[in-house]
C-alpha cells in the first residue's frame, strides 16, 4: 500500500484513533468488520437542502471522479498500471465514499475495451465496457464505495454542448438511461445518475425552446429514469450562460433553478450539481479581480450556493480540481474546500486519474504514489475511514502471453514493461567442406524480407501545455520489434506512454514498442500512445516506421 505524507498520517491517525482504528502501512485499517460493504448508505433521498438515508440521517457524498469509460478506450484509465482492486483500495483509504463514474453512450454499446494491461488485470481482458462498469460497481461495493453514473459524452470522441447530437438522439440518451436504471435496479451501490455532463453554449435553463431547454430535458430524462427505479438520486448540472446574461463554468450556472426548479414525478430526488475550476483551467475574470479570493463565496452564493443556504435543495459540486502548482490555484482550492465544509455540501473531486490534462490526479504518474499535498488541502472535507477487508474475488491466473485487447488508454503513466531480450541472430552454418571427388556447391543463403509495419496517427486531445496521441500499429508480416518517429516542435518531455517507450532528441520523438506491444503477429493491430508536454501540437505529422 502507498504511504501518505507524514503530516497527513499523523492527523489521520489521531482522527481514526478516536473510533478504534489503527494505521497499517500508512493507511487506515480496522480489526473489525470483514466487509467494507457494510458501510454503504443504501438508497438515498433529499430533504430540502440535505441528502439523507432511508432513516432520515443526513449523508454527505464525498466522491472522486475516475474517468476513462467515456473515452475511446472505453475503460477506466490506469488499468495498465494498477489493478482495479488497488485503485479502489486507494480511493477508499483517501477518505472518499463514492465514485463518480463517467461513461459515453458509444462505450455502452461497444464490444471491447482497451488500455488494460493483461498481466496486471487478466480478469478484465474479455469484458465489454458495460461489463467493466458492472465490475467497477461490484468491486466498489466490496470496498464500501457507492457509485454515481455520469453520462459524460454521447460519443467517445468529445463532449457535447447539448444532451443530444446528430449521431445520438435524445431518445437514445433516455433509452440508455432506462437500460442502466433497470440493470442496477436491485443494487443500491448505484445511488444516483448525473444526466448529462456540462451543458453549455446554446443550452438554456427554462427558456421554453425544446431543442435547447436543458431544464425541460432533464425533467423528461429524470422522470424516465424514475419510472424504472424510483430510488435513484437525479443529479442535474447547470448551464454556463444564465438568464441574466452572466456566464460561469460549463455546467456551473444554477441561478435560474430558483424560479424554474426541476420538479419530478417522484419527490425528493433532485440534487443540483455545479462544476467549478481555478484559473489554471480557464482564467475567468474573477481571478484577476483585486478582491480575489474574497469574491469567490459571493459568486458561488449567487450561482448555486443559495440552494443550500436557503434550504431549497441539495448541491453536489460534481467537479472541482487543480494541479496545485500556482499560488492562485492553491488559494482557490483552500477557499472552495472551506466553502464546501462550512455549508455541508456534497462533492466529487476531479480526479483520481493521474492523466487528467487540466488538473492532474490524486495519484502521481505511476498511479501508485499519492499526491499528499492535494490530500492535505482536501483534508477538511475528507473523512478517513477504515480500509476494511473487501469481499475477495478469485484472482485468475494470467496466461503466459495474454493477447492485449484493443488500445491502451491515452493518459497516465503506464510503466512500460521491460522490452524482451531479442533472440540472438542465428549464425549461418558453414559451407560444407568439398570432397576431392566433387567441386564444391555452396548452398545459397536467403536474406529474410524486412518486416512490414504501418502506423496511423490519432490525436486524442490537446491543450495549452501538451497533447495525447495514439497510434494504430499494424503488422502486415510478423515483427519482432518496431519503432515510430515524428517531428514534434515544442515538445518538452514525455509525460506518459502505454505500449511504447519514447524519447525526444532535437524535436524528434522516437517510440519503440514495449511490453505487450513489443512484437506483432501477422495482421495484428495494436493501439499504443503517449502524453507529451509541449508548447505546440503537430496536426498530421509524417511518421517514419521501422521494424525487424
Image (spheres, helix red, strand yellow):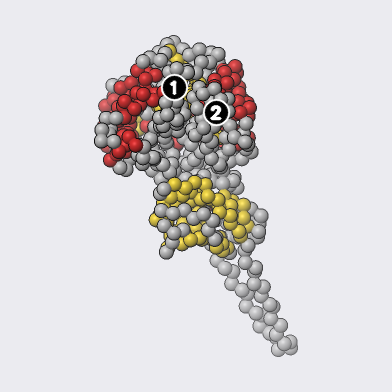
Residue at horizontal 42%, vertical 29%?
Answer: 245
19 vs 72: above or below: above
User: In 3D space, how far apart are the residues under numbered discs 1 and 2 (Cα atoms)?
Assistant: 15 Å
Residue that lies at the very extreme toward the bottom in this rendered image: 436
Quadrant into which the C terminus falls: bottom right
Mark 2 lies on a secondary structure that is: loop
Sequence-earlier tag: 1 or 2: 2
Residue at horizontal 43%, vertical 43%?
Answer: 357
Residue 122 image point, x, y percent: 55, 41
Mark 1 lies on a secondary structure that is: helix
Quadrant into which the N terminus falls: top left
375 vs 223: above or below: below
Q: Which corner quadrant of the image does residue 60 belong to?
A: top left
Residue 194 image point, x, y percent: 50, 26
Residue 163's disc number: none
Observer able to see residue 294:
yes
* Neighbours of disc 1 within 10 Å: few (<14), some (14-19), many (20+): many
Q: Which corner quadrant of the image does residue 173 belong to?
A: top right
Residue 256's disc number: 1
Residue at horizontal 61%, vertical 28%?
Answer: 170
Report whether 12 appears left or right of 224: left
* Neighbours of disc 2 within 10 Å: few (<14), some (14-19), many (20+): many
Observer able to see residue 418:
no
Q: Which residue is mark 2?
A: 212
Residue 270 image point, x, y percent: 48, 18
Residue at horizontal 28%, vertical 40%?
Answer: 327
Residue 203 image point, x, y percent: 51, 30
Amino acid at each position: 500500500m502507498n504511504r501518505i505524507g507524514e503530516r497527513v498520517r499523523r492527523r489521520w491517525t489521531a482522527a481514526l484513533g478516536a473510533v478504534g482504528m489503527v494505521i497499517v502501512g500508512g493507511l487506515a485499517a480496522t480489526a473489525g468488520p470483514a466487509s467494507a460493504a457494510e458501510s454503504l448508505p443504501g438508497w438515498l433521498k433529499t430533504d430540502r437542502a440535505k441528502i439523507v438515508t432511508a432513516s432520515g440521517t443526513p449523508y454527505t457524498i464525498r466522491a472522486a471522479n475516475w474517468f476513462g469509460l467515456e473515452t475511446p478506450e472505453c475503460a477506466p484509465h490506469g488499468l495498465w498500471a494498477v489493478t482495479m482492486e488497488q485503485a479502489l483500495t486507494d480511493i477508499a483509504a483517501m477518505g472518499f465514499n463514492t465514485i463518480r463514474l463517467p461513461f459515453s453512450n458509444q462505450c455502452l454499446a461497444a464490444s471491447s475495451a482497451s488500455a488494460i494491461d493483461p498481466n496486471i488485470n487478466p480478469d478484465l481482458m474479455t469484458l465489454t465496457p458495460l461489463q467493466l462498469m458492472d465490475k467497477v460497481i461490484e468491486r466498489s461495493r466490496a470496498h464500501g464505495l457507492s457509485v454515481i453514473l455520469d453520462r459524460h459524452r454521447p460519443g467517445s470522441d468529445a463532449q457535447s454542448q447539448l444532451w443530444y447530437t446528430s449521431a445520438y438522439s435524445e431518445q437514445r440518451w433516455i433509452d440508455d438511461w432506462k437500460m442502466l436504471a433497470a440493470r442496477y435496479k436491485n443494487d443500491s451501490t448505484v445511488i444516483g445518475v448525473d444526466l448529462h455532463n456540462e451543458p453549455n453554449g446554446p443550452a438554456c435553463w427554462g427558456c421554453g425552446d425544446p431543442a435547447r431547454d436543458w431544464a425541460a430535458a432533464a425533467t423528461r430524462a429524470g422522470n424516465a429514469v424514475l419510472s424504472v427505479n424510483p430510488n435513484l438520486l437525479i443529479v442535474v448540472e447547470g448551464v454556463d450562460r444564465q438568464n441574466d446574461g452572466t456566464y460561469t463554468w460549463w455546467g456551473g450556472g444554477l441561478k435560474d433553478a430558483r424560479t424554474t426548479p426541476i420538479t419530478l414525478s417522484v419527490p425528493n430526488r433532485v440534487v443540483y450539481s455545479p462544476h467549478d475550476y481555478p484559473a489554471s483551467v480557464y482564467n475567468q475574470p474573477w481571478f484577476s479581480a483585486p478582491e480575489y479570493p474574497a469574491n469567490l463565496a459571493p459568486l458561488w452564493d449567487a450561482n448555486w450556493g443559495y440552494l443550500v443556504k436557503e434550504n431549497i435543495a441539495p448541491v453536489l459540486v460534481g467537479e472541482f480540481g487543480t494541479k496545485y502548482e500556482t499560488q492562485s490555484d492553491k488559494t482557490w482550492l483552500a477557499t472552495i474546500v472551506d466553502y464546501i465544509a462550512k455549508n455541508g455540501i456534497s462533492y466529487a473531486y476531479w480526479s483520481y486519474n493521474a492523466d487528467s490534462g487540466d488538473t492532474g490526479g490524486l495519484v502521481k504518474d505511476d498511479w501508485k504514489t499519492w499526491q499528499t499535498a492535494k490530500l492535505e488541502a482536501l483534508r477538511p472535507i475528507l473523512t478517513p475511514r477504515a480500509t476494511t477487508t473487501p469481499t475477495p474475488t478469485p484472482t485468475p491466473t494470467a496466461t503466459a502471453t495474454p493477447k492485449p485487447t484493443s488500445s491502451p488508454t491515452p493518459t497516465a503513466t503506464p510503466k512500460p514493461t521491460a522490452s524482451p531480450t531479442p533472440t540472438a541472430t542465428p549464425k549461418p552454418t558453414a559451407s560444407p567442406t568439398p570432397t576431392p571427388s566433387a567441386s564444391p556447391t555452396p548452398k545459397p543463403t536467403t536474406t529474410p524480407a524486412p518486416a512490414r509495419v504501418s502506423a496511423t496517427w490519432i490525436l486524442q486531445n490537446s491543450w495549452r501545455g501538451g497533447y495525447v496521441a495514439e497510434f494504430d500499429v499494424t503488422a502486415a508480416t510478423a515483427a519482432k520489434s518496431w519503432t515510430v518517429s515524428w517531428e514534434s516542435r515544442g515538445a518538452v518531455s514525455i509525460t506518459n506512454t502505454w505500449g511504447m517507450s519514447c524519447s525526444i532528441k532535437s524535436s524528434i520523438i522516437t517510440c519503440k514498442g514495449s511490453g505487450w506491444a513489443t512484437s506483432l503477429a501477422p495482421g495484428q493491430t495494436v493501439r499504443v500512445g503517449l502524453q507529451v508536454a509541449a508548447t505546440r501540437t503537430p496536426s498530421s505529422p509524417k511518421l517514419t516506421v521501422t521494424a525487424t
